[in-house]
Image (cartoon, coloured by chain):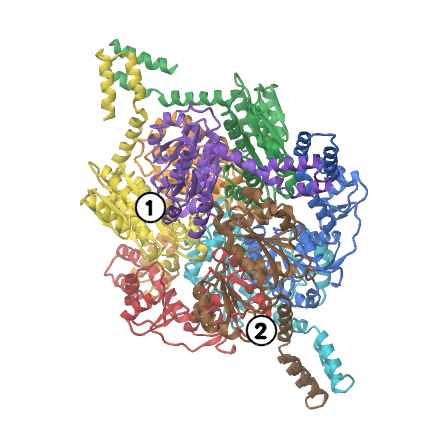
Chain colours: A purple, B orange, C yellow, D green, E red, F cyan, G blue, H brown
Amino acid sequence: MDLEHLKKILESLRNGRITVETAMDRLKGLPFEDIDFAKIDSHRSIRTGFSEVIYCPGKTLDQIRKIVERSVQNRHNILATRAEREIFETIREVTDDCEYHETARIVVINPRPLPPVGNIAVVCAGTADIPVGEEAAVTAEILGNRVRRFYDVGVAGLHRLFSVREELFKARVAVVVAGMEGALASVIGGLVSCPVIGVPTSVGYGASFGGLAAMLTMLNSCASGVSVVNIDNGFGAGYQASLINRMGPPDPGA
Amino acid sequence: MDLEHLKKILESLRNGRITVETAMDRLKGLPFEDIDFAKIDSHRSIRTGFSEVIYCPGKTLDQIRKIVERSVQNRHNILATRAEREIFETIREVTDDCEYHETARIVVINPRPLPPVGNIAVVCAGTADIPVGEEAAVTAEILGNRVRRFYDVGVAGLHRLFSVREELFKARVAVVVAGMEGALASVIGGLVSCPVIGVPTSVGYGASFGGLAAMLTMLNSCASGVSVVNIDNGFGAGYQASLINRMGPPDPGA
Amino acid sequence: MDLEHLKKILESLRNGRITVETAMDRLKGLPFEDIDFAKIDSHRSIRTGFSEVIYCPGKTLDQIRKIVERSVQNRHNILATRAEREIFETIREVTDDCEYHETARIVVINPRPLPPVGNIAVVCAGTADIPVGEEAAVTAEILGNRVRRFYDVGVAGLHRLFSVREELFKARVAVVVAGMEGALASVIGGLVSCPVIGVPTSVGYGASFGGLAAMLTMLNSCASGVSVVNIDNGFGAGYQASLINRMGPPDPGA
Amino acid sequence: MDLEHLKKILESLRNGRITVETAMDRLKGLPFEDIDFAKIDSHRSIRTGFSEVIYCPGKTLDQIRKIVERSVQNRHNILATRAEREIFETIREVTDDCEYHETARIVVINPRPLPPVGNIAVVCAGTADIPVGEEAAVTAEILGNRVRRFYDVGVAGLHRLFSVREELFKARVAVVVAGMEGALASVIGGLVSCPVIGVPTSVGYGASFGGLAAMLTMLNSCASGVSVVNIDNGFGAGYQASLINRMGPPDPGA
Amino acid sequence: MDLEHLKKILESLRNGRITVETAMDRLKGLPFEDIDFAKIDSHRSIRTGFSEVIYCPGKTLDQIRKIVERSVQNRHNILATRAEREIFETIREVTDDCEYHETARIVVINPRPLPPVGNIAVVCAGTADIPVGEEAAVTAEILGNRVRRFYDVGVAGLHRLFSVREELFKARVAVVVAGMEGALASVIGGLVSCPVIGVPTSVGYGASFGGLAAMLTMLNSCASGVSVVNIDNGFGAGYQASLINRMGPPDPGA
Amino acid sequence: MDLEHLKKILESLRNGRITVETAMDRLKGLPFEDIDFAKIDSHRSIRTGFSEVIYCPGKTLDQIRKIVERSVQNRHNILATRAEREIFETIREVTDDCEYHETARIVVINPRPLPPVGNIAVVCAGTADIPVGEEAAVTAEILGNRVRRFYDVGVAGLHRLFSVREELFKARVAVVVAGMEGALASVIGGLVSCPVIGVPTSVGYGASFGGLAAMLTMLNSCASGVSVVNIDNGFGAGYQASLINRMGPPDPGA
Amino acid sequence: MDLEHLKKILESLRNGRITVETAMDRLKGLPFEDIDFAKIDSHRSIRTGFSEVIYCPGKTLDQIRKIVERSVQNRHNILATRAEREIFETIREVTDDCEYHETARIVVINPRPLPPVGNIAVVCAGTADIPVGEEAAVTAEILGNRVRRFYDVGVAGLHRLFSVREELFKARVAVVVAGMEGALASVIGGLVSCPVIGVPTSVGYGASFGGLAAMLTMLNSCASGVSVVNIDNGFGAGYQASLINRMGPPDPGA
Amino acid sequence: MDLEHLKKILESLRNGRITVETAMDRLKGLPFEDIDFAKIDSHRSIRTGFSEVIYCPGKTLDQIRKIVERSVQNRHNILATRAEREIFETIREVTDDCEYHETARIVVINPRPLPPVGNIAVVCAGTADIPVGEEAAVTAEILGNRVRRFYDVGVAGLHRLFSVREELFKARVAVVVAGMEGALASVIGGLVSCPVIGVPTSVGYGASFGGLAAMLTMLNSCASGVSVVNIDNGFGAGYQASLINRMGPPDPGA
């Protein structure tokens, strides 16, 4: 351990076993930042409940295999996101201790369920938005959050949204997933009093320009309390929702 | 009058005062299209209740004065749109028979109120959208429509919108004016069963990109029955709303 | 039925079978909004002639099958839009009572032809725009409108457009479908006196940017009376055209 | 009070003073949603500590005066945002009980300081970003949060950022304000373990395209835990930061 | 023939066989515009040397077959553009009298070579631009123009361009085809004194955005005398070049 | 004069006054390209009738004065474009022999009217497009072309365009100037058989995005024979129109 | 000095004046990174010849005054960029030892001319690009580089560029400044063999979109060896050119 | 050889075998520029160590084969970039003397390793950026540079970057390859004192818009000394890095 290492250098200096110059040289060589950042990282790991996330697109199967082999020991709840079935199968060759959330396209390696706390609402406008909603929901669940799903409650039929209103009011943070015009984030932002994280999706056609329209809608939300992540970034929304939800007391959010 | 002119040529031929060749030459010289299109234009004029609209930006005061001088005789309810006060004063130098709707930035020349029929709802999301809403409302009123205004009912506080819901249900057509994220058009589109005309406005900042965000939102509306006009185009929305509203029976819409 | 349910609660109270407190509790539990919105929805259903539309992209075959199974009873003229043949075949496994409009990519479930009223013109600029035009035309027909198609009348050869001019004048509403530069909407908007709904299409290449050019053209139309729906959104245009056309008297539009 | 009103109707029915039909008619007329939404609003007000925000751009001085006159009684900590000095002076004509935060361009009407809780870090990349940072910081302070400011710590000189690192680690939520390339949000997102709210600013020139570049940078952040609000939207960031910060225990964040 | 028809109506009137009213009715029914526009079209046909162009994308093989069947009689040099080999084979099933220019992706139906006149230079920056260059060159050749090709003379090696400079000076009009940054149009525009038609191509990657970069480059050309057609629109450039080149004297351009 | 200089070197060599080596050295030092390009330039000058154009924006009054002083001798018909009145007055301080076309914002220095040849049509859609139209028209006139102006003939009232149709058919080249949706270029491109140069203007608002919409419209024109210059670039269009028009015989175009 | 400080702590420990624990606490408190980064900064300062740059836009006069007061002692050649005259006058109130380069809008505080080394070419396409060119040139000169300016050599008249070709070949690095279509960077990139830094400028109109067109042109350059900085970023180009030029031997570049 | 040719003409003149006029005619016909530019090209070749680069996309296998056949003799280190395996196999049919760098997608024809000089750092943010990084690294190596690779050091975990900091300080030029938000270029630009060349990559999704976000980030870098090449343009970055690195002394950069 690095702080130990630092202590040893100083003790050697104190005991006259090394000179001041030697001490300075060794201090210069010490990865102070590494100590430091490692500390941050463990802090992060303790708080959020997992150490590593593997974003799969652009990585070869071989690269993913190597990363998993390196990560798999002594670590739990490692997420591989945007993982097509083929990737799941590659990972399973490395370790049997993994599970695949197909709709969410997430593989969890060495899954060790954490007790769910608080209350995160994951709300989807339409059926086609569900894969992104699931990415957010599964991410949050792995990170130890209680998650409630509200799917197919888009603004074209507000009565569907209103029928779940009371449930929405109980959430500590709401993840709102919507494509096309993305108006649902504003409407929910105007209803609830908790933070809202908008996830624009690439669902739509024509002037949706691959999710740009929904993204701009959410960024311009006239309702206060709405912030936005990248198009289709269910993971990012689930992750931040977890950070927020776990800030509250252990469990009054049921 | 051109149809008279045509008749005279044919009568001259019939009476032997001109030959077939002469008749053909004269017919060739006749602005048939003009007759034809004039007919369209009078048809349009009869139906919509006015003959001409002067879009002011880019025209010099002098050009506007000349257009008004040319138009002012025998025509009623001529609109000058996007007219700053200076333009109103220029027009008033030509004729006293005009009135200025300052918020709507519309001058009506030779105003002759038409009896209002039907029921058009003009709905504005925020206070800053009112000038565009007024442009739509005044345009529709001049064209002989009953107009009801619902202002400041944006989605950030849905209860304001819901308190006027019953009134909205009575409209034959709804003009929805909204800037920022423009979600109001989708929400109203999901509530009412009449056609909705969305008017994105340039109200907003940053990622609203001068109204682009609201425009894309409305074009991507997941609610059926929403169509869209140009950013800030209150006139166009009021005009089309009039075409639609006046299609119905004279007055069951009260 | 919910109104029945409400009545029963009130009668139980009236008859002394339940207390005021119980009645209040039950009322609180009642989906008032649902009643309310259901009312809207039936209102909408009565007026437009159908209850549900299934937008297919982004839905799995399995999801579509389930939605159809749930919807198929007691409802007529359910539309499934953007339905590739594979989807049609999936639906036909659920019910034989359906028909496929291949060019329009629309499946009608439990089709019950409504008597066509009024007069909607669907105008296409080029051959490649026909699928979108058919989506509009078939939608409007299912909704009980008389539809006339005018295809391949783009502005590059105005004589083609002029040869159908008299027919166009008879329409109560015109749906104008055009890709590339989309100028046809403006030209028709300048000819007719009825409302024009522009449908930009993604037909084109290079600087058409997937329909963006045509969409901007139509939104900037210098002709009054033109509003616009999303790129390739034939359904939306047909739907709104139906709302407008059916506002007129039952059938003087022949 | 509406619940009282409901009770009275039911009691009249129970007592036989009205019929079931009359009861149903009266229930139909009740503004259920209003009751409901008012409840939401007071809930929100109680939680966040203020009832209303006046976004000034696009409102005339006269409109602002009227809104303030209507709002000023019995309410505290009303914010008027994006308020130029002229607006402050207009408000001061209505009430003396107001204060002006000039850099933040915020007027607080009837200010009643709330005891600050928790710990929000507001971090600015450059000097020109400070007005937006102040909008966030002042908003959060009025809402009862302890705020620490870290200004001029952009990525071009990481040592400035590192010198305040330990302080940053104490925050419960970080608001990161940056223009130009907006990289600071990612860098801080990679350092801290609390939620980060990125505020892109319009500071920059050329390819910053009015803040678009910084906005895209933040939305694409490779660091987890970053969400984004509109360009220059300091208020929105401060508001959401307050929602998050106040979720934690009353005060271990000092 | 319509003029005959008109004459007959007038003669009937002259001879008293019909009344003035009948004549007016019949005149109203006459397709005057058709006569008129047909005249324009033959005028165009005579001048440019061909009657019809079939733009293939978006048309089914069946539609193309029908159009060809309808067009093939009595007409020469009909072009089918953007025609993949499959289309060529479909056309050959209708008529053997056709030829395929594979690189240009053009089928010429009923080819009847016209004597080449004048001098059009088709200049390509890179090898990948050649298909678009060929589309322009073949189009112009079919239309009866002498065409000289200058390929692979991009600005990265100006000496290649300079070695053909004298030849370029002889052209009456230059078509410049370039992707990536499209600078060649400006450079040639600064060299020659004839009109230059720039054709941006979609060749490139990344910030070329499908030809947008080259298109903007050419539109902003600081050299006078450059105009631009759509991205990859070799046909349009070849067509306009033909209009210009054929305006000159029959053949001093050799 | 450079050709003289070259001749002298060769004569010196011929006469034995210098060696081959000296000749080679001197030739290497000679600005061959300059000779060469000067030749091009005089060629250009002879053909187009003027030697220099001063594009004013971004130049200080002092810079413009110096350029004019340098250019004014021995040259005629020098154009200063985009010249506000202040610039005209600066130029008049250098020379009295200049004239100002105020609407076109063009100063002509040492004007020497050339006999007008051929026939260029300059067509404007709306009143606000006239300044750009005038820039094109005046440029073409100074360059020695006969110009006919057709203003205010936009597509919203096609009868206005049709009433000048016969005149349009006489043009050798048409410059079409239009803002908003810019559809006029396509419509005229479909009518006439001469080359059409489209000039999109920045006239419009909202989704015209400073002329982008009109520019895309014209680039996507479905009518063959249309090419496009930069937004508001009346000069460029007039210049290219001159190159094309003057290619024809001296004067059959009246 | 921090290394001194570190040494003292270690010596105190060595000498038994402090304990290991005290040493560890003090080390923890030491701004190690600051030492480290300060080293970088002095390294940078030594190499490039100046310590600080003040980018003025968005800073108040008061902020600039304070920054200058803080920076002015013991440092030379401090640059204030984008400095309008008003800013220069504010700075001169703090210190007389400053000079103003008006066209470049640069103030140099405590100027101490460095001996110019190497050879940087700054090339401008047009007169309006000169202010950006001067920003690059003055920046490079202050940093101790020999700079040669080549102005008004745009591609519309290549002979102007060719006449300075030999001089260009001598440069170690070329900064190419161009607006409008920005083709000059590619052309020079194809001529010279040294690195080229392109600076797109916002000079232009219409489809230049504030420099976007030139920026895309340069990024897509088909000539190898061209890299690009932000629109109008003369400073950035001059700075990087200095880094490159000073990498070579002291002075063979004359 | 052309200089020989020139000499012969001059000698003939000197010897009286030809007249001055004949000499002038022949000189006019001489490809002076070719001589000239060939000189430039050999200069370039000598300096950079290779003569030709074949950019493969858009070229047919047949075209590539022909180019290779033409180039292969007497030239070394010819690069074919963006070469899929199929292209490598085509080239190997022409010559066995070639090698394939698969990740970099580069074929080197007639490879003749040059002794590596200096020190170029190629830094990649993420695993998915490695192919672009390899394109830069292999290009630079072929051109005779010493290259050090630093992969997977993105800003989301700054400690990874800091652990290689000392190595980075030794580079003469750094190529920074990053997708998503591209912040790494700014961070490294703030650390090192050598020139930084940013290569945005198309790695990312949603609002990365194919690399646009990273490109804008890098262009807006607040760190001085950063310039940018096209998205995914590893070759261009490696090429320019070589130009810069080889400017320094032969080898102090180890």
Left or right position of H193 against G217: right
Q: Nearer the viewer, residue B105 or C133?
A: C133
- Residue D11 visible: yes
Q: Is residue D39 above or below residue C58?
A: above
The disc numbered 1 marks a residue on which chain? C
Give residue F190's quadrant in the image.
Answer: bottom left
Q: How many marks?
A: 2
Tags 2 and 1 both on a single chain: no
Q: Quick one: B68 or D102, which is closer to the camera?
A: D102
Mark 2 lies on a secondary structure that is helix
Name the chain letter of the residue that bears numbered label 2. E
Q: Is residue A213 left or right of residue E69?
A: right
Q: Which residue is mark 1?
A: C57
> Quadrant of the rendered structure where residue D6 is?
top left
**CA separation in Å, label 2 and label 1:** 55 Å
Q: Quadrant of residue F17?
A: bottom right
Along the viewing direction, whichever of F42 and A167 lies nearer the viewer: A167
> x, y percentage for residue F112?
65, 65
Q: Quadrant of the N terminus of chain C?
A: top left
**Which amino acid type is marked by label 1?**
Pro
| Residue C164 on image: x %, y % | 31, 55
Residue at screen point 28% across, 67% down:
E69
Q: Secondary structure at mark 1?
A: loop
User: Is disc 1 surrounded by few (<14), some (14 to 19) or many (20+) residues within 10 Å?
Assistant: some
- Residue B131: assigned label: none
Q: Is residue B89 visible?
A: no
Residue F199 in percent (x, y) is at: 51, 56
User: Where is residue C46 shown, x and y percent of the image?
Assistant: 25, 34
Q: Is residue D145 above or below residue D181?
A: above
The tag on residue E165 is 2
In the image, taking residue G139 as reference, residue H96 lies left or right, namely: left
